[in-house]
Image (cartoon, rainbow, N blue to C red):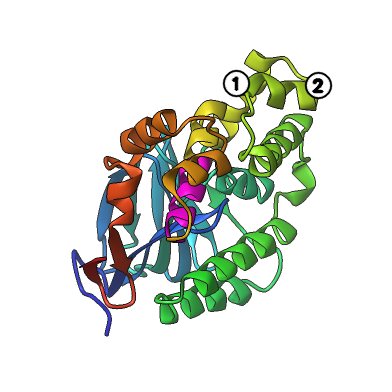
Amino acid sequence: MGLKANGCDFRKFVNYEDSDDLYLYEVGRNKCTPLYSYEHLVKNRIIIHIIKKGKGILRINNKQYDIHKDQIFLIPENYRCFYQADKDDPWEYIWFIIGGPKIPLMLKEAGLTPEHPVYTPVSDSRVITELALDTLKNYKRQYYCIGNLYRICDYMIENSSRKEEITVSNSLRYVKNAISYIQLKYSEPVKIEQVASALGLNRSYLTRLFKDATGYSLQEYLLTYRMKMAVKLLSDKSLSVAEIAKNVGYNDTFTFSKAFKRHYGKAPSDYRSVEIKVSTGTITNV
């Protein structure tokens, strides 16, 4: 049964971060009352709203956009936004709070950016709506939900009204290649200079491109990815912390443990001592 809160018809906090590129934190649906409004300033997250019915307005970057059924609007991270349902035909929408290093790139390929925060499909918009509703219905299934989000992004890219205006620039290709390089080499003692060198770029130039495109610095992304892989390995009780440190690119356990504790607030051994059972919502010491 759906959770009703703050005017929402359905809202679930899921916090799905197992995927390397795309994270899902919250899903919801709201059938708004006339002139229902909300103001956002979201940190380190992105929100997309899929308009199922009705219409309303979005204000961002000192601009106002009239938005209607079948469109999608973006609430970018670190931008103050205001949106409001129409007085006579208030909208009903589905929203996803998402994140991850590649999600800004995927949305940009679809033409959805802070400068262009409204998406209009050129083909049957029911595909996106049906995928979104299916995600709400199956919100307990992490990989199913993430798969649906990839399908939504793919459909948006292939059916964007701005597709002809958009070309994937060399800078975006460099960023994608940098992500792929890190995901391939994270288990080695790789340095940022090596990433830039492998792509034939100056370090400072690549660092700027990466930060602008993803919101992460290269060093932050490398650290975050290593920590994420370390958490997965900690579930394997046959591996020692020293072995895990080497498997994620650290030559000594102390440096790894220090970085892990700074990232998660717990030492690796302490983190391992708690098993979180998402299916039951219980925490069991093991």
Looking at the image, residue 160 lies above or below residue 116: below
The residue where tag 2 is placed is 200
Looking at numbered disc 2 in the image, what kind of residue is underneath it? Gly
What is the x, y in percent for residue 213?
Answer: 59, 33
Is 72 situated left or right of 205 in this image? left
Looking at the image, residue 239 lies above or below residue 203: below
Count how many numbered circles sit on residues in the image: 2
Q: Secondary structure at mark 2?
A: loop
What is the x, y in percent for residue 87?
Answer: 30, 63
**Residue drawn 43% across the image and 52% down it:** 231
Q: Quadrant of residue 168?
A: top right
**Residue drawn 72% across the image and 61% down it:** 159
Magenta segment: 226-236
What is the x, y in percent for residue 83?
Answer: 34, 51
**Label 1 close to label 2 by CB (< 8 Å):** no
**Residue drawn 67% across the image and 74% down it:** 124
Q: Local crowd at mark 2 within 10 Å, few (<14), some, or many (≥20)?
A: few
Looking at numbered disc 1 in the image, what kind of residue is underneath it? Arg
Measure the C-alpha gap from mark 1 to mark 2: 15 Å
Q: Secondary structure at mark 1?
A: helix
Q: Nearer the viewer, residue 260 or 18?
A: 260
Q: Quadrant of the N terminus?
A: bottom left
The residue where tag 1 is placed is 208
What is the x, y in percent for residue 20?
Answer: 56, 52
Q: Quadrant of residue 276?
A: bottom left
